[in-house]
Image: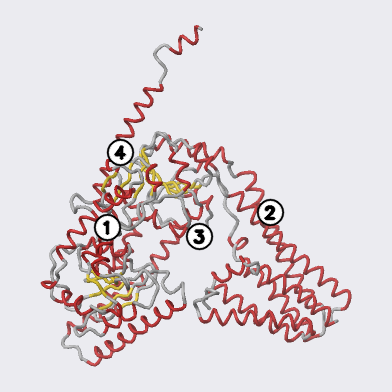
């Protein structure tokens, strides 16, 4: 099951049934069992449809293994012809007609796929954009989705038509039914092919070429004159390295620009007010007029950074404030190619200097973590709520979390547990998946016991009843907000439009929509936490509630060495780390700065009681002072705020860049009178 990547048990049953149906079809075609063939074919269509809806990832993997929907469709068509040849229902003329129609259907399907490929390639602009006015390019609409999307489902319709015709022919003994059904399927395929031709012609004639697109983008760049560019190249699953910096860059008072190199990144990018350019080709990037950019920010070290690094009029900065909690973290020698390296705090500075990779201390700037400025900070060490909340947020697969959750649920003094595993948790190994399910089962069982206890106690007064009624209203409000957010996301992302249409239509950000989306998400989080009774534990899987929203709810975090703990440190609330086996406590703290202010849990959740004591009595929190010290060492001082330090660093470097450009122009300018002397000569 894990090797297939199927998470839904129904998906596993459907896949097994689909495989069985294919085998049955082959046997029925060889033996001439028409009724069995029709039944297996109809069952296979149902399995295909179920898998398309519940396991799209599996269907994509089958396609990469050359067993995709098209291959399966072709195999079933060949088996149908083999069956018709053995049944002798159609006769020679009918069999020839059926064979001709099947060949026409297969050819039409291949032609349809070729047309879609040609249209998509032609509609892939040299430079795609968001929030940049390129409406003068006169980009045409894409073909309707019903003509281009869902190829597997479309072929199922053709196959279903043929199977129904076969069933009718078997019941009546009249071959005209199956021939008519195949005619209908082939005709439908031909109609879709013909309907796509005008869009191909329109794409060839009307869509702008690379030179026209680059000229229009240059015109926008000259008019807008962005001073700062946020540049990123990498796979889609690393997009978070870019998105974490969209907010700080958007807050800059001067015009900014985002440049990405992969088209899939443009699709994954969350809605932002920043103008975004996707420039896949290095040749096209070199032709853009970026002479007004003074600061280039790089969130990741990748080979394609060199395509922008070679522009001498920019000051190039590597953003390295992530992972500063681990002194053993590697420092890439490639970092020395940048003009400056920006880190969160003193820990990042020391790590780069001690690594001796060529990064000078004078070229390191501490900017804090602008992304953490909005977290709720506990500076007073006040007592938590009567029922304190423990957030368990592991980032690694394994069974170590089961005893931790069990110990929390069995605590002598009641508390609330929020279990928020890292998204890949349980997807890598069967053991991790089993451990995750056991943890979820423990939490659900604990919730059932608490709910039974709560129902067994009559409400003491009308205030308790009102609170329960309010939670019901909050749950209803959360459901409404979920629908509104989904509808708003659909408007912002526009699934009906392709890259070219979005480049044309997203001429400018819609501040009202972005503000509305942010407000709805904030209201959703408020309703989510208010809707759940405060005595119930929660399992949080997926992107919402967000990790930072969970931080605001938590009085204590239990995690492992990761950016999760590094971010939580900004709240100054107590946290615990699971220490690795075989490494002593002193050595573990020596190697990892963030561990010096952490309570440590040993194997089997040993040390849990010592950890929970300060949760109920802040006076027993022995590491409060250490957390302040480690936070300042890792993340920098609290004042001024990180976003202000980030903005000041950009401004200072931009001024330096202006000076460098002026000096460069001064040295490269011809001496006075040189032009006139050359004319006389």
Dot placed on the residue nearer the N-terminal end, 4 or 3: 3
Residue beneath label 4, please? 653
166 or 666: nearer the eye? Answer: 666
Q: How many angstroms separate mark 1 from mark 4 (CA)?
A: 23 Å
* Whole-percent x, y for residue 300 in the image: 40, 51
> What colour scheme does the image use?
secondary structure
Front one among 652 and 141: 652
Separation (CA) of disc 3 from disc 1? 32 Å
Q: Which mark is residue 197?
A: 2
Q: Nearer the viewer, mark 2 or mark 1?
A: 1
Q: Earlier in the sequence, mark 2 or mark 4?
A: 2
Query: In terms of secondary structure, where does tag 2 sit?
Result: helix
Question: At x 70% / y 74%, what residue is drawn?
Answer: 159
Q: Earlier in the sequence, mark 3 or mark 1?
A: 1
Between discs 2 and 1, the one toward the N terminus:
2
Q: CA distance from mark 2 to mark 1?
A: 52 Å
- Where on the picture, by quarter, is residue 89? bottom right
Residue 495 numbered tag: 3
Q: Is residue 382 above or below residue 518?
A: below
Mark 3 in CB contact with mark 1 (< 8 angstroms):
no
């Amino acid at each position: 099951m894990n090797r297939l990547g199927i998470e839904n048990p129904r998906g596993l049953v459907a896949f097994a049934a689909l495989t069985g149906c294919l085998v049955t079809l082959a046997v029925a075609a060889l033996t001439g069992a028409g009724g069995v063939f029709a039944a297996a074919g109809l069952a296979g269509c149902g399995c295909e449809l179920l898998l398309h809806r519940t396991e799209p990832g599996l269907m994509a993997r089958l396609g990469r293994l050359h067993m995709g929907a098209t291959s399966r469709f072709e195999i079933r068509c060949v088996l149908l012809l083999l069956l018709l040849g053995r049944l002798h229902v159609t006769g020679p003329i009918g069999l020839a007609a059926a064979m001709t129609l099947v060949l026409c259907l297969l050819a039409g399907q291949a032609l349809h796929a070729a047309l879609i490929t040609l249209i998509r390639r032609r509609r892939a602009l040299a430079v795609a954009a968001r929030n940049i006015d390129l409406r003068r390019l006169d980009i045409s609409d894409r073909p309707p989705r019903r003509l281009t999307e869902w190829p597997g489902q479309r072929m199922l319709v053709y196959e279903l038509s043929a199977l129904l015709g076969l069933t009718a022919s078997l019941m009546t003994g009249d071959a005209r039914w199956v021939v008519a059904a195949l005619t209908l399927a082939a005709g439908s395929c031909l109609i879709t092919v013909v309907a796509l031709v005008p869009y191909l012609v329109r794409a060839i004639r009307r869509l702008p070429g690379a030179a026209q697109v680059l000229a229009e983008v240059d015109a926008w760049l000259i008019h807008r004159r962005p001073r700062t560019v946020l540049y990123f190249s990498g796979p889609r699953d690393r997009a978070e390295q870019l998105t974490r910096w969209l907010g700080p860059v958007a807050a800059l008072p001067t015009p900014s620009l985002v440049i990405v190199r992969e088209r899939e990144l443009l699709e994954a990018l969350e809605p932002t007010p920043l103008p975004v350019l996707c420039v896949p080709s290095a040749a096209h990037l070199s032709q853009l007029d970026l002479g007004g950019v003074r600061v280039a920010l790089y969130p990741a070290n990748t080979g394609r950074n060199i395509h922008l690094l070679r522009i001498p009029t920019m000051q190039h900065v590597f953003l390295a404030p992530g992972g500063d909690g681990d002194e053993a973290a590697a420092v890439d020698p490639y970092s020395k190619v940048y003009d400056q390296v920006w880190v969160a705090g003193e820990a990042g500075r020391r790590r780069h200097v001690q690594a001796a990779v060529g990064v000078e201390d004078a070229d390191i700037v501490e900017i804090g973590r602008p992304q953490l400025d909005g977290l709720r900070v506990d500076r007073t060490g006040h007592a938590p709520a009567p029922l304190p909340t423990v957030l368990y947020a592991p980032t690694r697969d394994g069974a170590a979390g089961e005893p931790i959750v069990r110990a929390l649920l069995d605590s002598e003094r009641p508390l609330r547990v929020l279990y928020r595993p890292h998204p890949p948790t349980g997807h890598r190994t069967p053991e991790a998946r089993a451990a995750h399910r056991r943890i979820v089962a423990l939490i659900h069982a604990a919730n059932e016991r608490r709910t039974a206890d709560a129902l067994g106690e009559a409400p003491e007064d009308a205030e308790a009843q009102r609170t329960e009624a309010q939670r019901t209203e909050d749950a209803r409000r959360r459901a409404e907000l979920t629908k509104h957010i989904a509808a708003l996301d659909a408007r912002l992302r526009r699934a009906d439009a392709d890259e070219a249409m979005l480049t044309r239509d997203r001429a400018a950000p819609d501040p009202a929509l972005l503000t509305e989306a942010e407000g709805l998400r904030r209201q959703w989080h408020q309703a989510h936490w208010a809707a759940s009774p405060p005595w119930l534990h929660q399992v949080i899987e997926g992107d919402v509630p967000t990790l930072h929203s969970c931080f605001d709810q938590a009085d204590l975090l239990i995690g492992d060495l990761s950016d999760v703990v590094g971010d939580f440190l900004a709240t100054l609330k107590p946290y615990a780390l699971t220490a690795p086996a075989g490494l002593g406590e002193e050595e573990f703290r020596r190697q990892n700065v963030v561990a010096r202010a952490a309570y440590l849990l040993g194997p089997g959740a040993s040390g849990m009681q010592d950890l929970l004591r300060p949760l109920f009595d802040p006076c027993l929190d022995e590491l409060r002072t250490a957390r302040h010290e480690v936070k300042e060492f890792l993340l920098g001082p609290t004042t001024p705020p990180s976003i202000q330090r980030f903005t000041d660093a950009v401004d200072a470097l931009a001024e330096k860049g202006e000076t460098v450009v002026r000096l460069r122009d001064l040295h490269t300018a011809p001496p006075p009178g040189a032009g006139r002397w050359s004319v006389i000569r």
